[in-house]
Amino acid sequence: MTAIMAGTRAEMLRLRRWPALWVMLGVWLLLNIIFDYVFTYLAYRNGGGFASEGVSRERLLAGLMPDAVPEAVVQGMPMFGGAIMLTLGALAAGSGYGWGTWKTAFSQGPGRLTVTAGTLAALACVVVGLVVVTFAVDLGFASTLATVEGQSIAWPAAGDVAGAFGGGLLILGMWTVAGVAIGTLARSPALAIGLGAVWVLVVENLLRGAGTLLDWLQPLTDVTPGTVAGSVAAALGATPVSDEGGTPGVVTNLSGGSSIALALAYLAVFAVLTGVLVRRRDVN
Amino acid sequence: MTTLTDTAAPPEVAAAVSTQLLTKRYGEHVAVDAVSLTVRRGEVYGFLGPNGAGKTTTLRMILGLIRATSGAATVLGQRPGAPAANSRIGALIEGPGFYPYLSGRDNLRVLARYRGLADDNVEWALAQVDLTDRAGDRFRSYSLGMKQRLGVAAALLGEPELLILDEPTNGLDPAGVSDMRRLIADLAAAGHTVLLSSHLLSEVQEVCDRVGVISRGRLITEATVTELRGGNRLLVRADPLDAALAVCMRVVGDNAVSVVDGTLRLLVDPGLAAEVTRALVSAEVDVHEIRPSERSLEEVFFEMTATEEDQR
């Protein structure tokens, strides 16, 4: 346990000084603000015509208020948040092979699995921090908009906040560990990011589209990581893409319980796959 | 493989590193072929061979970075890669691997944290390789020599029992090479075991106690530097030659004397020079020159690797 803590401290040091980490987190926050607040507010100010997809002004305004923050936080996570965190995980694991830093780390004393556990623990801290900051930023924007629009500020229920916080951790954590697994498998950040981004942003959507046409494909598309993440978000109140004004990536293929169980299973499988690859393969 | 050294000390007791028939294959290519070597505790062991001979692959197996196809190895009494062994080893393998965006100091701090060491160790290691002044600069801005010195500093963290240094003077300027040799000598004097891989014969000759020579994946000899260079020889130029030959054969034995290009070569401890000189003078032989005869390690190396080529 002490060795894992030491590894986590080491990984935290190198992650927090890594410009790529801050760029990825900044991109996520920027997308979150633009899509959740800026565009929606512009649509509201323009009378519901601009990019509102037929959603009424009242509903647009309700989505911008502080009590809607839990849904706002999780709705972008299945697709854009997932792609960003998968990229981060792939970079964190894959870059070390190019730089030769895994070779250096694996020669320091802690076992390979201990080092890997430290990496995953440090990335888990990053995910927790990101979800907290996303909540804080969204609450800040929502409160400001409520004040500007002369609305009374109603804070979200504690249960909704807790649910969205846990769901956010699960969705982003699953995609981050998926990125680590792909980065380890590819032993290269470029290939891992390419494969991961294509899967999250293209293949999953194509598969879901094909699944609606081919009955035999539906059971498979219902359990892909993207569908699982989208179903978790929908279960937490995010508007599914099939509804008016819904968010891409948010789907209702699975129930809340099933999607959470499958997301946990994916997280465990990706972590175990990473551990097996790290332990068994030669490090050149 | 020829073994010139005595093997009186049981390797399992005295060895810091011991390999038995260690082999690594990549498909049909045999990178390391049944290498059995022993690095004794407290010595500086030179692992000598041309580029591509299998030095780095052997070191990687010793560190547990890659798995041997067959054979076995013991490192500080543990299997290769065992945390109990690696925590007592400092290694620089085939160029340093560091985070380019971190400073030299922060890179070492990351490694110190893995080892559970305080930051004081980082400053000490930086001072050992004379890198303190540039320790705050990003690694990506370092010259090749500075990167190499940071790699050696990383290997020194925690003052490990065993240092495995793969071509540590790569990219260093002459002053840096000299500093590195002095550092290795100091480490050895302080009781550290050093396994030094190099293709630079002069480097090995200067700092190593014993040498293993590897060529095309096979260890072709393991001996002390003196033994390899043929240190047990005396070269005598004297006149008349016939009388000198008779005297020398009487003093050191018939089989230990040969004549090459008008010079006597005696296969004896150079410490016998005084006794031989006295005998020659007593026999009224004029002694023009008597000195120990040593081949350079370079000559030995090329001789051995050429012989190995011929045998294939």
Image (spheres, rainbow, N blue to C red):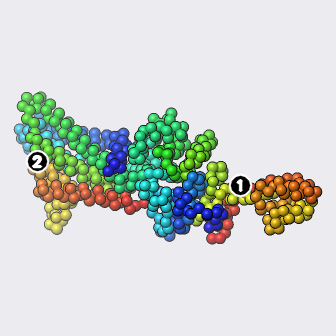
Drawn side of residue A238 relative to residue B190, left or right: left
Q: Residues within 10 Å of mark 1 (few under 14, many from 20)?
A: some
Q: Chain of mark 1?
A: B
Location of the C terminus of chain B by quadrant is bottom right
Across and down, in percent, residue A214 comes to: 16, 65
Tell me the mark number nearer the camera, choosing from 2 and 1. 1
In this rendering, is residue A39 above or below A248? Answer: above
Q: On the picture, is A247 further left or further right than B168?
A: left
Query: In terms of depth relative to the viewer, which is nearer, B154 or A43?
Result: B154
Task: Tell me how far mark 2 sits from mark 1, CA to CA.
Answer: 80 Å
Question: Given the image, on which type of amino acid does mark 1 rest?
Answer: Ser
Identify the disc placed on residue A237: 2
Residue at disc 1, secondary structure? loop
Q: Is residue A192 visible?
A: no
Residue contact at pointers 2 and 1, CB within 8 angstroms? no
Quickly name the residue at label 1: B296
Please name whichever residue, A158 or A56, is drawn nearer the observer in this view of the structure: A158
Q: Position of residue B228 (x, y in %)?
A: 68, 59
Q: Which one is nearer the viewer's eye here, B242 or B306?
A: B242
Image quarter where the N terminus of chain B lies is bottom right
The number of numbered badges drawn on the structure is 2
Residues at discs 2 and 1 both on one chain: no
Q: Mark 2: give few (<14), some (14-19) or many (20+) Cα within 10 Å.
A: some
Could you tell me residue A277's position as x and y percent? 35, 60
